[in-house]
């Protein structure tokens, strides 16, 4: 049986409902306000969290590796710095290990209208795309750059054996000027007292078969007691196909391209390395440093080739890429001078 409520009881029930509804609205508003305050606090107090996430999406898109085990005979360019300056000499050096046989070393650099190369403190010009015979495992070279602020310059070292077979190793060097005045064609003319001397080197070059010599390379066959020597070398720069991730070598890239760098790390020491890491500073917007996972141990002569791709290329005319091996200094190495390298890539807007 239904109970009939008095008017006073009905008024009290209506008041309770209004109070409950008001409290509900106040509570929801408070939660929304707290949520907005919390989001604002998180953004203001933790920009690194959002920046890191944004960088990850914006920058690194692909990393591939290719392990190559040690060969019986290894020829490898080991110059400490591959970013060199116009009109300043640098040392091109290399190592040759393993079952070394009789033969001769030769050096060649790729032809480019903006680059010439000389040796003997600038007194002897070296023709491009020509194998220049060397009687040692290093040579002092002086690049001369004109009409450009910087230019890529692949250099190849060859070892031609007596039986005609050949080893070779190529590394990408970049020549840059310190100021724009070096780009004028009259830079060296004032100091040339005998302008006819540059024509002499070609006939004076001795054929390889007349300057061959046996290079004795000391070897350490006790890798347990030896030392690690990881060397990083830039091999190519270019772009990655956004669909297939195929790498294509290019001297310059569009700002809309997926940029790429192809480099390798080789152990030229006499001891197997521990696991190691590397990082790479990429020319992206916003700036981003890629930190690798642990990489596999490398025995003497072993190497790993890396292809690293990145999006959001910086809106500049050029971008610098820096690679640093073992940034935590965890490895006991012969030297750390060859653990870092830089290169420059041209960017077209």
Image: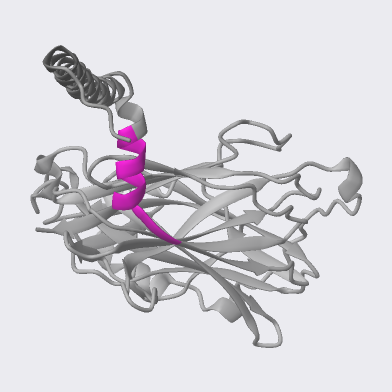
Residue furthest to the bottom in view is: 164
Q: Position of residue 64 (x, y in %)?
A: 51, 65
Q: Main secondary structure of the magenta part?
A: helix
For the C terminus, which image quadrant?
Answer: bottom left
Check the image and report above or below for 103 versus 194.
below
Could you say where residue 319 lies in the image, as x and y percent from the top left? 25, 48
**Could you tell whether 252 is left or right of 348 in the image?**
right
Residue under the image location 28 percent in, 47 percent down: 283
Percent x, y of residue 240: 34, 70
Q: Is residue 60 magenta?
A: yes
Above or below — where is 256 with respect to 318? below
- Which quadrant holds residue 336? top right
Question: Going 23% across and 53% down the picture, which residue do you hit?
Answer: 312
Picture quadrant where residue 72 is located: bottom right
Which corner quadrant holds the N terminus?
Answer: top left
Residue nearest the observer in this picture, 46 or 101: 46
Q: Is residue 343 above or below residue 243?
A: above
Q: Which of these two is toward me, 223 or 17?
A: 17
- The residue range painted magenta reads 50-62
């Amino acid at each position: 049986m239904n109970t009939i409520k008095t008017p006073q009881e009905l008024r009290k029930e209506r008041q309770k409902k209004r109070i409950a509804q008001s409290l509900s609205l106040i509570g929801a508003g408070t939660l929304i306000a707290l949520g907005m305050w919390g989001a604002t606090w998180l953004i203001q107090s933790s920009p690194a969290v959002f920046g890191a996430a944004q960088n990850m999406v914006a920058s690194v898109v692909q990393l591939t590796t290719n392990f190559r085990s040690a060969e019986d005979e290894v020829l490898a360019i080991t110059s400490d710095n591959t970013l060199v300056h116009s009109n300043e000499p640098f040392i091109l050096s290399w190592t040759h290990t393993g079952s070394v046989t009789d033969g001769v070393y030769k050096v060649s650099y790729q032809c480019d209208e903006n680059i010439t190369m000389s040796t003997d403190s600038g007194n002897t010009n070296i023709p491009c795309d020509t194998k220049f015979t060397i009687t040692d495992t290093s040579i002092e070279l002086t690049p001369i750059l004109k009409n450009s602020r910087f230019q890529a310059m692949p250099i190849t070292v060859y070892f031609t054996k007596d039986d005609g077979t050949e080893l070779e190793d190529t590394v990408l060097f970049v020549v840059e000027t310190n100021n724009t005045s070096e780009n004028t064609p009259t830079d060296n003319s004032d100091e040339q007292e005998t302008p006819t001397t540059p024509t002499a080197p070609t006939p004076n070059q001795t054929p390889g078969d007349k300057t061959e010599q046996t290079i004795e390379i000391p070897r350490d066959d006790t890798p347990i007691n030896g030392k690690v020597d990881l060397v990083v070398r830039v091999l190519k720069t270019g772009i990655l196909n956004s669909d297939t991730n195929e790498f294509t070598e290019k001297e310059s890239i569009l700002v809309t391209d997926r940029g790429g760098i192809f480099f390798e790390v080789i152990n030229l020491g006499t001891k197997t390395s521990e696991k190691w890491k590397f990082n790479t500073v990429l020319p992206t917007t916003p700036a981003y440093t890629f930190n690798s996972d642990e990489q596999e141990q490398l025995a003497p002569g072993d190497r790993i080739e890396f292809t690293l791709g990145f999006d959001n290329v910086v809106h500049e005319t050029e971008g610098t890429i820096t690679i640093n091996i073992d940034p935590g200094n965890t490895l006991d190495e012969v030297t750390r001078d060859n653990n870092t390298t830089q290169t420059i890539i041209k960017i077209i807007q």
